[in-house]
């Protein structure tokens, strides 16, 4: 059966990934168009998790390539197993010397050399692995903004052809196009060439409403009242205070668990002060928070804002200031934090049959 | 591609039963072909000739986006079309997401896209209405220009003025208009004044109008070049261009010298974010030293003796990672006084994110201020200390002496991996001499970037700007938005 947007939405939900329409539709398009999906957004909004979710819902392998400055083709694509080759040469030579006829020995060695560059000695790195995979894998290239521009150029060549040529072996074409997910923290601008080849998704910090859903999904014991207060407070700290590093969803969840462990049933300023180091991880930001707590208090402000919003879970919107990477008026409330171990897995019987992943020829 | 989603309702019909019509080639196929070959032109295929195909709308929409500065390639356009067909065409949100995912690849461009989409994809009645409004506006504008021509006459003859100048006249208050008219009336009737005076009078009027135009420039003006010539599209483009920045923080667009003290912390924060980006961008290595690492023979032999001399475990020479050094020279002379806190914040922000920045301030002479910014103290303290200790603060500008001082004492700081950033309004004594010193410094540095606090439109007449421009890459920079744009665009391009 073919998969649809609805199917994808349900599958994401069953996997415990609380997403929104923008994310689902974009992911769906990337899969249907057979294009790499480029996800940008602040750290900790759940970019990487999308790849993981995909590999789970399609029951396929997740091949991960972590980009970093200095990453090169050797580490990303393939490498010859030099040690193994050398051992082989040595063993052949010794065997040849053991034989009486020097000529016969040379002949043998010569013949063996031809085999030195065979698949036996090839060390697959993530990209080659994804291309040679038997079933469509999910290829995650994480933090692609960290790699060198040279490597980026090489990458988009691979991503547009899905063939690799190994001089000694010839050209290897992908058996099927992997589902490719690239993530970027926008530390630097990616090249136009790479962007052109991708379907683009920007994930923002979640809205208050969405964050409540996330907290409830991940920390179900917490109760609706506290989770709402946590989401509002975090939203206020993120956008109302001038902090350098805005708390991520993962940090919100850590905080929620900590508050739960402290048996808190309501959030108040002194509790925030005591547990703030779970949300903010550097001194300057903690100072800002402390000053705010002394100055006018946080929960008071948060309640005011909640009332002003007419009880609707509308928070401050991301994008009111130059948020890390330029004005972001577009609010794609996204969500994140992976399913906990033991979180609900898609049930094979109950969910629609797993559709076959997209194939390359599937384009008009 | 097989449709897997049931399409309901009767959205803009995109004919899909290829060949069912029989005789004529499927317009959709032909369109795609044409598009791929780049022969589709909105003027040609737009309007009534082609019915309201999704393709047609999409091409127009992409034109709007392109005129708004979003680069959309043909490949992306085709993809957007494919994407739009994969989603429920009646579901506006899905269509929007589909187009956004395929057409816009930059965070900054998302708000522009959203506005353009909302304005462009509207019901038919709205479109008609919009065209009417525009026709109206055009007529009104033409009327204004005629009025201006009628008003501005010298001895009964029309003055030679550009449309822009006439438009400026039309936007003047009644009092100003009257003044101009009075001036013309008086000079027309002057004693011994004949036709030969007209060019002079015209110059005076033009000068006046130009001055007003510059003053009014704070108000937004749409560049004719940005427009397509298609009335409907132009209206959308104008609306969006006029609205750009509205939702953004106004502080971004405020001239730095006018920002009130109470907003300083906010500015500091923004500058920090921007400078962090600058820092990561220019401190990235520009290129890898070698594709393949080089084997370190000495270390390889040493470590392989235990394998009986077979080079089993290869040792590589480590790559040299060279990050560019940044050297800042900032103008704190009297003419720059109002930008001083901006300048100091810039140094402060940059120093707090990049280690090993050397910073200097200059006016009559040059002073090294690196030590003040090395310690992690709040901005206010640092600023107070710099100002209190500086002997050059707020004096006249003498870049020649300053640069000579630099050469004498700090020459060793310049090397082929140094990026020299100068913040100044270029107003100095002996600009040409200073420029030639700068030229010699440029040869020793990797790059010279000049952030000029003078508005771009004032550059034209200034010889000092010309002189320094030849020896540096100069950017207009007097608002945070400028700084941001420089960080995002120019730096990205330079670094690649």
Image (cartoon, coloured by chain):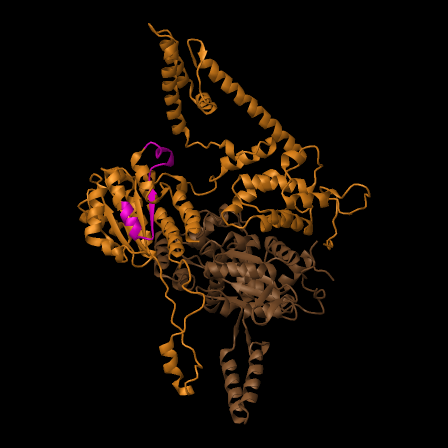
Residue B373 appears in the rendering: yes
- In this figure, what is the number of numbered marks? 0
* Horizontal and vertical percent position of residue B364: 19, 42
Which image quadrant: the N terminus of chain A? bottom right
The extreme top residue here reads B191
* Side of B336 where A45 appears, left or right: right
* Side of B70 where B415 appears, left or right: left
* Side of B268 where A340 appears, left or right: right
Q: Residue at x 67, y 60 (%)?
A: A360
Q: In this view, does A259 lie above or below B184?
A: below
Residue B239 part of the magenta-drawn span: no
Q: Give the range drawn in magenta.
A: B438-461
Q: Residue at x 56, y 24 (%)?
A: B138
Chain identifier, colour brown: A
Residue A248 appears in the rendering: no
* Horizontal and vertical percent position of residue A256: 48, 64
Q: Quadrant of residue B165?
A: top left
Q: In this view, does B315 lie above or below B380?
A: below
* Horizontal and vertical percent position of residue A336: 54, 61
The hue of chain B in the figure is: orange
Q: In which quarter of the image is residue B257?
A: top left
Residue B441 part of the magenta-drawn span: yes
Q: In which quarter of the image is residue B432?
A: top left
* Side of A33 where B227 appears, left or right: left
Q: Is residue B183 above or below residue B397?
A: above
Q: Nearer the viewer, residue A281 or A140?
A: A140
* Horizontal and vertical percent position of residue A353: 72, 66
């Amino acid at each position: 059966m073919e998969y649809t947007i609805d199917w994808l939405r349900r599958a994401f939900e069953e996997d415990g990934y609380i997403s929104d329409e923008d994310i689902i539709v974009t992911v769906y398009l990337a899969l249907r168009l057979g294009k790499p999906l480029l996800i940008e957004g602040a750290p900790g909004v759940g970019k990487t998790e999308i790849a993981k979710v995909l590999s789970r819902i399609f029951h396929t392998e997740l091949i991960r390539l972590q980009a970093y400055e200095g990453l090169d083709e050797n580490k990303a694509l393939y490498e010859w197993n030099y040690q193994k080759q050398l051992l082989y040469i040595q063993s052949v030579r010794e065997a040849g010397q053991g034989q009486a006829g020097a000529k016969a020995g040379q002949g043998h060695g010569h013949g063996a050399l031809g085999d030195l560059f065979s698949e036996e000695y090839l060390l697959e790195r993530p990209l080659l692995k994804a291309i040679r995979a038997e079933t469509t894998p999910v290829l995650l290239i994480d933090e692609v903004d960290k790699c060198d521009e040279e490597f980026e150029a090489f990458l988009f060549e691979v991503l547009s052809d899905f063939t690799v040529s190994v001089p000694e072996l010839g050209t290897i074409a992908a058996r099927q196009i992997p589902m490719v997910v690239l993530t970027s923290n926008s530390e630097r601008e990616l090249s136009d060439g790479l962007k052109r080849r991708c379907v683009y998704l920007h994930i923002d910090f979640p809205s208050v409403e969405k964050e409540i859903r996330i907290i409830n999904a991940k920390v179900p014991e917490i109760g609706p009242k506290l989770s709402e207060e946590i989401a509002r407070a975090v939203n206020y700290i993120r956008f109302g205070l001038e902090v350098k590093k805005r708390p991520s969803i993962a940090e919100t969840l850590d905080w929620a668990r900590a508050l739960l462990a402290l048996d808190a049933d309501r959030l108040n300023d002194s509790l925030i002060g005591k547990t703030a180091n779970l949300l903010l991880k550097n001194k300057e930001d903690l100072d800002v928070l402390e000053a705010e707590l002394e100055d006018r208090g946080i929960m008071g402000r948060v309640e005011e804002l909640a009332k002003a919003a007419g009880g609707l879970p509308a928070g401050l919107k991301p994008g009111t200031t130059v948020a890390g990477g330029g004005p972001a008026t577009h609010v794609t409330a996204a969500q994140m934090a992976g399913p906990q171990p033991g979180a609900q897995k898609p049930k094979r019987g109950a969910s629609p049959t797993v559709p076959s992943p997209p194939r390359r020829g599937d384009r008009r | 591609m097989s449709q897997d989603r049931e399409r309901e309702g009767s959205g803009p019909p995109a004919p899909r039963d290829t060949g069912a019509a029989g005789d004529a080639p499927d317009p959709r196929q032909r369109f795609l072909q044409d598009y791929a070959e780049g022969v589709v032109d909105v003027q040609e295929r737009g309007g009534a000739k082609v019915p309201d195909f999704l393709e047609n709308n999409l091409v127009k929409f992409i034109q709007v986006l392109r005129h708004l500065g979003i680069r959309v390639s043909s490949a992306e356009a085709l993809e957007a079309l494919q994407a739009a067909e994969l989603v429920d065409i009646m579901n506006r949100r899905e269509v929007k997401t589909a187009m956004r995912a395929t057409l816009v690849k930059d965070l900054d461009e998302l708000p522009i896209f959203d506005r353009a989409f909302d304005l462009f994809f509207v019901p038919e009645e709205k479109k008609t209405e919009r065209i009417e409004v525009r026709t109206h506006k055009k007529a009104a504008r033409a009327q204004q220009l005629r009025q201006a021509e009628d008003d501005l006459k010298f001895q009964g003859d029309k003055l030679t003025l550009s449309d822009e100048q006439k438009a400026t006249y039309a936007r003047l208050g009644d009092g100003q208009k009257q003044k101009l008219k009075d001036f013309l009336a008086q000079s027309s009737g002057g004693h011994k004044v004949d036709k030969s005076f007209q060019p002079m009078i015209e110059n005076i009027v033009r000068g006046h109008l130009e001055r007003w135009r510059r003053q009014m420039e704070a108000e937004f003006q749409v560049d004719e070049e940005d427009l397509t010539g298609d009335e409907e599209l132009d209206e959308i483009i104008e609306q969006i261009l006029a609205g750009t920045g509205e939702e953004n923080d106004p502080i971004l667009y405020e001239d730095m010298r006018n920002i009130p003290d109470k907003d300083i912390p906010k500015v500091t924060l923004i500058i920090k974010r921007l400078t962090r980006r600058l820092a990561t961008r220019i401190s990235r290595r520009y290129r890898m030293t070698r594709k393949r690492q080089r084997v370190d023979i000495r270390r390889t032999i040493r470590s392989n003796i235990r394998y009986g001399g077979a080079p089993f475990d290869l040792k590589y020479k480590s790559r040299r990672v060279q990050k560019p050094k940044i050297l800042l020279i900032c103008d704190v002379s009297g003419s720059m006084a109002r930008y001083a806190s901006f300048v100091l914040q810039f140094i402060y922000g940059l120093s707090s994110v990049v280690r090993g920045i050397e910073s200097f301030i200059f006016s009559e002479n040059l002073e090294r201020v690196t030590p003040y910014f090395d310690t992690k103290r709040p901005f206010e303290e640092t600023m107070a200390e710099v100002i209190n200790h500086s002997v050059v603060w707020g004096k006249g500008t003498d870049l020649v002496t300053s640069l000579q001082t630099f050469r004498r004492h700090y020459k060793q700081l310049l090397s082929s991996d140094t990026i020299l950033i100068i913040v100044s309004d270029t107003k100095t004594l002996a600009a040409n001499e200073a420029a030639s010193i700068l030229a010699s410094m440029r040869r020793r540095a990797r790059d010279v970037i000049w952030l000029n606090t003078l508005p771009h439109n004032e550059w034209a007449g200034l010889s000092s700007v010309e002189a320094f421009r030849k020896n540096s890459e100069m950017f207009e920079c007097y608002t945070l938005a400028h700084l941001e744009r420089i960080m995002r665009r120019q730096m990205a391009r330079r670094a690649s």
